[in-house]
Image: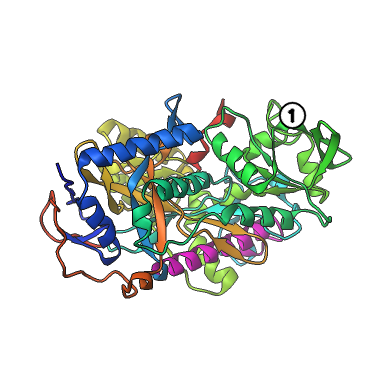
Amino acid sequence: MTVAFELDASGAWNEMFEAPGVPRALYRPVVKQLSMATMRELHQRRDLLARTFSDRGVTFAFSGEERPFPLDLLPRVISALEWDLVARGISQRVRALEAFLADVYGDGQIFNDGLIPRSVVLSSPNFIRAAKGIVPENGARVTVSGVDLIRDELGAFRVLEDNVRIPSGVSYVIENRRAMTQHASSLFSEYSVHPVDEYPSRLLAALRSAAPQVTEPVVVVLTPGVHNAAYFEHVLLARMMGAELVEGSDLICRSNKVFMRTTHGERQVHSIYRRVDDEWLDPLHFRFDSMVGVPGLVNAARAGNVAIANALGNGVADDKLVYTYVPSFISYYLGEQPLLENVETYRLEDAEIRGEVLGALDRYVVKPVDGSGGKGIVIGHLASEEELAATAVAIAADPRKWIAQRPVALSTMPTLTESTIGARHIDLRPFAINDGESVWVLPGGLTRVALAEGELVVNSSKGGGSKDTWVVDDRRRGIPQGQQRSEEPVPVLVPKASGALRQSDPVLRAEDDQ
């Protein structure tokens, strides 16, 4: 049985096809190769990928069970020209958020100028007063960021949310590429794909630049431990950077300095890439019952003897109410127009807007401002009457805790299922590294896939998977820049729908949720 491609009829932008039976120019080699395979052969390749991931320990925790992280055989392909816009937009956004964090934990000039109410920031559950005055050597509070993007119905990339606390998932980018290079090598010969293996060295350089000025700064990766859902990532990054992987019990603070216990005695630590949430990081300042933090770490950072990346208090920039102000931050701090637009979002503290949303709640997507990983999201047209009623009560009780967005038909991508290649919704998390001088964006990022048909939440904690994301040079194969319509037909395409497609213990929680 040969492959059949099923297309989505919801009006979402299809990444691979511009019309039924007509693949976009960049995807023609992918479609051609897949069309010559049988479903049995594709399932065998998929199972081989899963075994490879299991052997390498590339897993995630789902419903209390460790599973190989699902990697789809069909890569997502993005032209270098389009990626240039994405990368510049991500860099712009990170620079604006850096300026915002420096301001709100500094002089607060943005409040004096009335661009954002002081109450919005101070009422955020992720605003950490202890972060005031703590500035790393290179000035970068957002060393690592993962800004989640979606394509709207017209094919334009939009920012869905910012992740500048402890964004995770880059390990899957690295391992996905390694697996695809091994098991889909014939496809790589058709493309000039930008590599992703530069990330660990970039991260290490940024962590060193954040450290106090010493000749050879010591960098460590601080993990909550083996029970954390992203522990594989902690191990991988530490190994690839040549840094020690430590837990809180491996570190000790003395005289406002941090030391690592080793078999050869104590060794001073200058830069910490922490994968522990703020509230658990230092039991002297935050949760006294934390067993994974380091007592005295905040004081050591304030004294300038150690850098913590990402910085304390960054979560205020992840607040989904603050998200609505980020386009204004770009204009205010950078004097530029946003290159990437937000999804249309409504602030429910405004009584008039709140009334409109509550009067038609089934036409909106409602999110808690401090939620992550799809937790607490209510998709109006999919929710029951009971869920909508409960949501309305919660919004009325505390409007500050919620925002509403217009529903966006997340773009779809053909994805291997048990019986065919079906359309599944996807997003994209590009990763950026800021060394204080410039923001570098990893070419490709993590494409996450909602594996269940019709599902809109893509997080692995909700059973999602991923695709290898290829940024390719179009001119490598003589394809003009952009994704123009192809004229040559491609065989064995069986569309499901007719009609043109429009380009359209809390500390141990899964870090994929951030």
For the N terminus, which image quadrant? top left
Q: Quadrant of residue 392?
A: top left
Q: Secondary structure at mark 1?
A: helix
Nearer the observer, 180 or 158: 180
Residue ID for mark 1:
249
**At 50% from the left edge and 60% from the top edge, which residue is drawn?**
325
The answer to whether any part of residue 342 appears in the image is: no
Q: Amino acid at mark 1?
A: Ser
415 lies left or right of 188: left
Q: Position of residue 125 (x, y in %)?
A: 58, 42
Residue 42 magenta-highlighted: no
**Above or below, comparing residue 197 to residue 73 in the picture:** below
Q: How many marks can you see?
A: 1
Q: Is residue 195 left or right of residue 477?
A: right
Picture residue at 48% right of the left edge, 50% below the top: 320
- Locate residue 36, reporting x and y percent: 20, 51
**Percent from the top left, x then y, of residue 190?**
34, 62
Q: Residue at x 59, y 57 (%)?
A: 433
Q: Give the quarter of the image for residue 30.
A: bottom left
Against 370, residue 62 (above or below) is above
Q: Residue at x 34, y 35 (%)?
A: 47
Of residue 124 and residue 339, the one placed in the foreground of this image is 339
From the viewer's perspective, tell me whether residue 121 is left or right of residue 51: right
Main SS of residues in magenta: helix
User: Magenta span has 86?
Assistant: yes
Region in magenta: 82-111
Asked if one can make out residue 328 in the rendered structure from this viewpoint, the answer is yes
382 relative position to 340: left or right: left
